Amino acid sequence: MELLTHLADSALSYTRMDTVDALRFFFISAACTILSVSLADSLRSRFIPYGARATSGPAQSAATESKPSTPAPSSRESTVTRSLDYLASLQVPHSYFMQFYVVSVLSSIFWALQLLFHGPAFQAIATRIHPDHLQPAMSTNQVMVCWGFMLVQGVRRLYESRSFAKPSSSKMWFVHWIAGLAFYLAIAVALWIEGAGTVLKHKLTLEDFNLTSRWSGRLLVCVPVFTLASGIQHDCHHYLSSLKKYTLPEHSLFSLILCPHYTAECMIYLSLAVMAAPGDELINKTLLSALVFVAVNLGITASSTRLWYRRTFGENAVRGKWNMVPFIY
């Protein structure tokens, strides 16, 4: 344990970051990495698609069969190709998605206990925050509300992944799985880290979980957005689970947007970022960096979905529809 603490302190000192900076850096660097992988055709085709999107539609299969033969690659190109193919073959079952929400729920419970009792994990993070990041700080009310909503989100998604999942042989690249686990571990900390200064000064009690008398104007706006987005996402997941395999969605939610459940996911994290804004600030910068990761990741997946729909169902299936954000993307 002392070795890990020493390594963490050395890394933060060397990079001149505190734990808030490190958390933001993780989200932004992960988003940039995903984006960079999606730009190169040779990388995108191998590492980005998963589940149904990793399969070829009729149009793609026909194009592949009719594609003229190309010259044999050089020895160096062949080595690179084999290496990339090997990395792409390191996959895990798509059903591992459920583990993300198990981790989310367990992390929420773990950090609730740490915050309540000023546990060692909380102390390890809170005492490595630069004073500039302790002021302005989230209130105890904001910390508890955001914690509660993230727990609700994790429980709902866990329920959906268990209830709506169908037996499938689909797989995903193992890095998708690792990135997902890392995200849910990190977001559980991001929800309260800008309120660490407040929690350090105030011993939380169970009374702090009583939110009925602590409503603010910010909460009156964000809570309905969070609730509506959660309801839309739940309806999307329920509808998609009712479809026959590879059937084009015809629900009204999918009439304008190809992936409205991704839009809802972004709205959920946007509402949390605004809800957790410290002091008079407009938005919580740490949660904003997490939102960037979510938007980039889901935006690339939505683009992959569009290509798959076009190949499988034809151009008419995607004509006039936005990938994720109406009138923007």
Image (cartoon, rainbow, N blue to C red):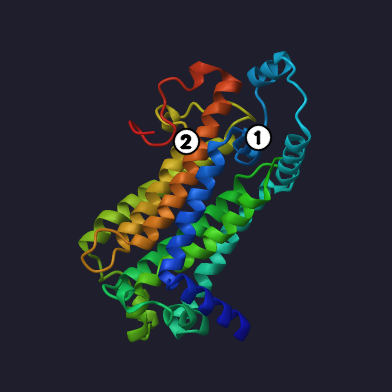
For badge 2, the amino acid type reads Cys
Residue 277 pos. (x, y %): 29, 63
Camera-side residue of 170 and 156? 170
For badge 1, the amino acid type reads Ala
Residue 203 location, quadrant: bottom left
Residue 169 visible from this viewpoint: no
Label 2 neighbour load within 10 Å: few <14, some 14-19, many 20+: many
Q: Earlier in the sequence, mark 1 or mark 2?
A: 1
Quadrant into which the C terminus falls = top left
- Find disc 1 in the rendering and name its residue: 54
**Residue at 55% from the left image edge and 17% from the top image edge:** 314
- Find disc 2 in the rendering and name its residue: 259
Residue 161 pos. (x, y %): 59, 50
Residue 326 pos. (x, y %): 35, 33
| Separation of residues labelled 1 and 2 (CA atoms) | 17 Å
Q: Residue 90 shows which numbered tag?
A: none
On screen, 221 above or below 185?
Answer: above
Residue 38 location, quadrant: top right
Camera-side residue of 67 and 256? 67
On screen, 2 above or below 236?
Answer: below
